Image (cartoon, rainbow, N blue to C red):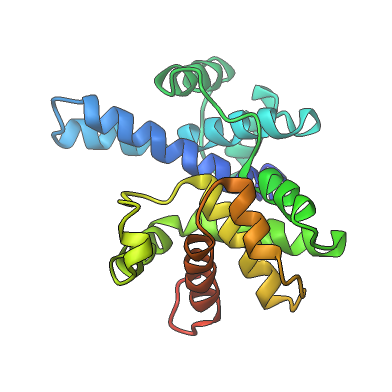
Amino acid sequence: MCAWFGCKKHGVPGQACRLFERYLFSVLHNCVERGDDFRRCLLAEVPILIASCISLSAKMSNSALMLHPKVIKIILLCKNIRTTIDEIIATEFKVFRILDFRVPMWTSVEVGEMLAVKAGFPVTMLERVALVVDVAEFHRNIIDRKVKHAAYGKEQLSSLGISRVLSLHLTAGAVAATARLGHYDEPEGVRLLAQLTKAPPLYIECIQDIICAEILSPQSPI
């Protein structure tokens, strides 16, 4: 859907996906009744909910990407999804409220680009950083599960008590993976990324290894 609205860059797709997941988790966690009627209503709302998440992410990412409700309505109508401007505004506010009015000011891609520059990687790598960070965000559940599994086999990592991979560490690992896949030689890169994100270098390397393996694997959904 991000492609429909012209919001394929600046980390908007990954962040919109994360906002939608947070919204669904909150709604399902606090919902008592989850019968067929509830599922049908939720399913019917999905396109407008996703559009709202994209709109919120775009607003926080870049003022030039702000989507007017009228534009959202027209684009959805072109895809045979009928709604009203009032419904779009109300849905976006509902999502924002459910998220406790908390949307990151920076997308993971922007954080990744900043980390890459701070760690001394060349500016020419930034476009690839954006791509790998977005891919990692879309498939973070797979990466998260494999990182936790790998951590159990390493004493230095198992002592961290990892329950889930934080977005900051996932992004640092994606930057490191970009450097490896693109052959951008920076001997101190992983150490500096670990220092910047206050994580053990071995942990960033673990995330890097898994992202690289997933991207390079022909069987991988990535």
Image quadrant where residue 131 sits: bottom right
| Nearer to me, 69 or 59 | 59
Q: Is residue 180 above or below residue 175?
A: below
**For residue 149, above or below residue 163:** below
Q: Position of residue 14 (x, y in %)?
A: 57, 48
Residue beneath the point at 30% across and 51% down: 161
Q: Quadrant of residue 40?
A: top left
Residue 190 in percent (x, y) is at 63, 64
- Work out whether 185 lies above or below 76: below
Residue visible at 70% across and 50% down in the picture: 115
Tell me: 83 left or right of 64.
left
Name the residue located 48 percent from the left edge and 74 percent from the top edge: 214
- Work out whether residue 43 or residue 210 is closer to the camera in this orientation and state it: 210
Decide which of 42, 188 is in the foreground and name it.
188
Farthest-out residue, bottom: 218
Q: Is residue 1 visible?
A: no
Asked whether 36 or 12 is in front, the reply is: 12
Q: Is residue 89 visible?
A: yes
